[in-house]
Image (cartoon, rainbow, N blue to C red):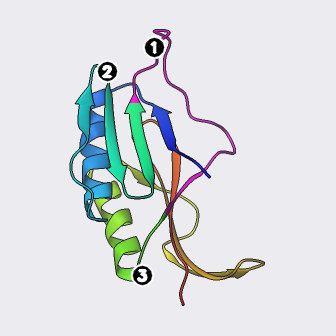
């Protein structure tokens, strides 16, 4: 559905370290620099971080969550731990299973250094 997702950040280098760590747990290499942006490419799409081109501060979306599909429970936990270790903050419930209309999911929520809400999601087979 998406070709790419880009999030605005205020401290590009702090955010690069955060995303290099969390996305590195999923096998993605470090972000590739392009002016005031870093790109993380996977076989299924591109994620990027940027300082806003209008010069205004980046802000997070209240009610917004960016979900990353993760291949195992262990990799969800690694994603979350790397995020907390690199300037992120945990939010909502601790990582774990949840049941809902979408079935049983293993989820971990955290906020990046700019307050963007992220979710690592594993859908058990």
Question: x, y (%) of residue 113?
Answer: 39, 40
Q: Residue at x 45, y 51 (%)?
A: 45
Q: CA distance from mark 2 to mark 1?
A: 9 Å
The front one of 17 and 32 is 32
How would you rate the neighbour count of disc 1 (Cα within 10 Å): few for under 14, some for 14-19, many for 20 or more? few
Which comes sooner in the sequence, label 2 or label 1?
2
Tell me the residue that label 3 is attached to: 73
Tell me the residue that label 2 is attached to: 36
Q: Residue at x 38, y 49 (%)?
A: 88
Residue extending farthest to the top is 55
Tell me the residue that label 1 is attached to: 53
Name the image quarter holding residue 81. bottom left
Task: Note whether 73 is above or below 70 in the view shown.
Answer: below
Question: x, y (%) of residue 57?
Answer: 48, 17
Residue 71 colored in magenta in the image = no
C-beta proximity under 8 Å, tags 2 and 3: no
Task: Note whether 27 is above or below 33 in the view shown.
Answer: below
Give the residues in magenta: 50-68
Dot 3 lies on which element? helix
Which comes sooner in the sequence, label 2 or label 3?
2
């Amino acid at each position: 559905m998406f070709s790419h997702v880009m999030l605005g950040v205020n401290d590009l280098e702090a955010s690069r370290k955060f995303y290099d760590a969390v996305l590195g747990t999923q096998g993605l290499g470090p972000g590739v620099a392009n002016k005031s942006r870093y790109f993380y490419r996977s076989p299924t799409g591109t994620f990027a971080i940027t300082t806003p081109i209008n010069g205004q501060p980046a802000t997070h979306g209240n009610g917004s969550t960016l979900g990353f599909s993760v291949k195992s429970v262990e990799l969800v936990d690694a994603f979350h731990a790397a995020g907390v270790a690199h300037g992120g903050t945990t939010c909502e419930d601790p990582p774990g299973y949840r049941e809902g209309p979408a079935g049983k999911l293993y989820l971990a929520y955290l906020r990046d250094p700019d307050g963007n809400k992220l979710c690592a999601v594993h859908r058990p087979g």
